[in-house]
Image (tube, rainbow, N blue to C red):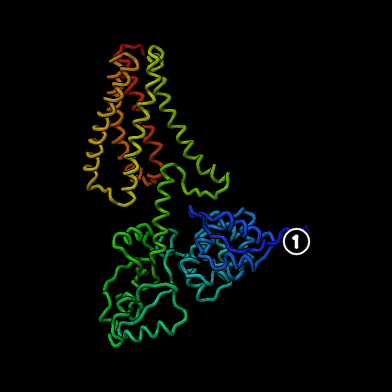
Amino acid sequence: MTEADHNEIPEIVEIPAVRDEDGRISADFLALIEAGIAAEDAPALIGLAGDLHEADVADLIEALPEDERVPLVRLLGDEFDYATLTELDEAVRLSILENLPSDTLAEGIGELDSDDAVYILEDLDAADQAAILDQLPYSDRIQLQRSLDYPEDSAGRLMQTDFIAVPPFWSVGQTIDHMRETEDLPDTFHEIFVVDPGFRLIGSVPLDKILRTKRTTKISEIMTEDPQTFKATDDREDVARAFERYNLVSAAAVDDAGRLVGMLMIDDIVDVIQEEAEEDLRGLAGLGDEEISDTVLVTARSRLTWLLVNLCTAGLAATVISLFEAPIAAMVALAVLMPIVASMGGNAATQTMTVAVRALATRELTARNMLRVLRREVLVAFLNGMTLAVLLGTGATLWSGLPGLGMVIAMAIIINLFFAGVAGLLIPVALEKAGVDPAIASSVFVTTVTDVIGFFAFLGIAALWFGLPL
């Protein structure tokens, strides 16, 4: 068998399903794609993947070995939808962008909605951005550059600069004819914006209302005045929160003078909500913006910082233990039981901290309700502390045969859980006031507090109760 025969795709009787029962890219479909890449059989690959949704193509690319991803994109050619790049992990997307010529990227990006184009371009450095923008039509280049000039986490980076705006004196019939006759319209939109001669937003009309209204009716008669709008400079988290609060599907973006500059769509807002939730989740573990596709060195570097901080704070707990060397030597049972006290406090604090970090992110925790929430956490800590104190105190007494040891661990648990509830709430609040992301920094300091308090309370009370040497 020749090498050419070996690389040929086997005859396909029936194309396998793209995804298996678990929703992953199926092994059989992936094998066909890899065979097509090896044989450089562009027609076969186009037949397999050319009509797939961009999310499916993105998952397919991520499922392939790294050295087969760019060849797949090249072989798909004009059938590759560059919106696929917006669905990829950042590291994978950058790898593909770095290995495609700028003229190919310019052609593909030029066909995208402006918000998707900006999403791809913002990952590139200034020189690469300029190389691609210079090859786009002037009007497209100006629109994209204006969006890129907005702050990274602003609504201006999310908005589409393609939208439909009409004057208030137009009729419904004129508006419908305009949409039918104009070729350069956004692919998806849910409302028509109404502007004055200065292009300042004065209203909006949902598409369903236009379709249900007689052609002779003026737009001004059916428009919603003072619709929900956002400044292009608004933080995207605030915009996402408003979309969620008011159940918005789309909204206008305006500049500081109130002129209409773009349209915000729910699909981009959902991405923001998901990214922020993932960011908080990673932050609670001290992972920053790590992605599963990151290299070993990038991953190790991103994790090392907070591990080093944790190493320093762990030294405080070790210092507390060293202060009670004599009591521990005199009663070995203390060494067996003291990790339980610290562990229970750490878990309780993490529960409170997680709720507090999420409440801060959603603006549910404010100065107005701080005392009420703190009171609730203290009462919860007290009730849970009493329950655990009875259980652990009884267990320690039965295990050691020393009722006094049961009382000691019971008191230590109550004390530690009290401080766990207070620290789990106040430390995230204090970090946010100091300008530090509480999702990333809270866990290190909260666990340090519960370790130090737990060890000190348990060993200190034990030394006093049993009269042990210090």
- Quickly name the residue at label 1: 4
- Secondary element type, mark 1: helix
* Left or right of residue 407, residue 24 in this image: right
In the displayed orientation, state which residue is furthest to the right: 2
Residue 400 in percent (x, y) is at 34, 15
* Left or right of residue 117, residue 214 in this image: left
Q: Is residue 426 above or below residue 50?
A: above
In the displayed orientation, state which residue is furthest to the bottom: 216
Q: Is residue 48 above or below residue 310?
A: below
Image label count: 1
Q: Quadrant of the C terminus?
A: top left
Residue 310 in percent (x, y) is at 45, 34
Quadrant of residue 69 in the image? bottom right
Residue 135 in percent (x, y) is at 58, 72
Residue drawn where x is 35% and y is 76% of the image: 192
Residue 154 visible here: yes
Report the front residue among 134 and 353: 353
Residue 404 in percent (x, y) is at 28, 15
* Left or right of residue 213, residue 157 in this image: right
Quadrant of residue 239 in the image? bottom left
Circle 1 crowding by C-alpha within 10 Å: few under 14, some 14–19, many from 20:
few
Residue 89 visible here: no
Q: Indicate the amino acid at tag 1.
A: Ala
Residue drawn where x is 39% and y is 38% of the image: 443
Q: Quadrant of the N terminus?
A: bottom right
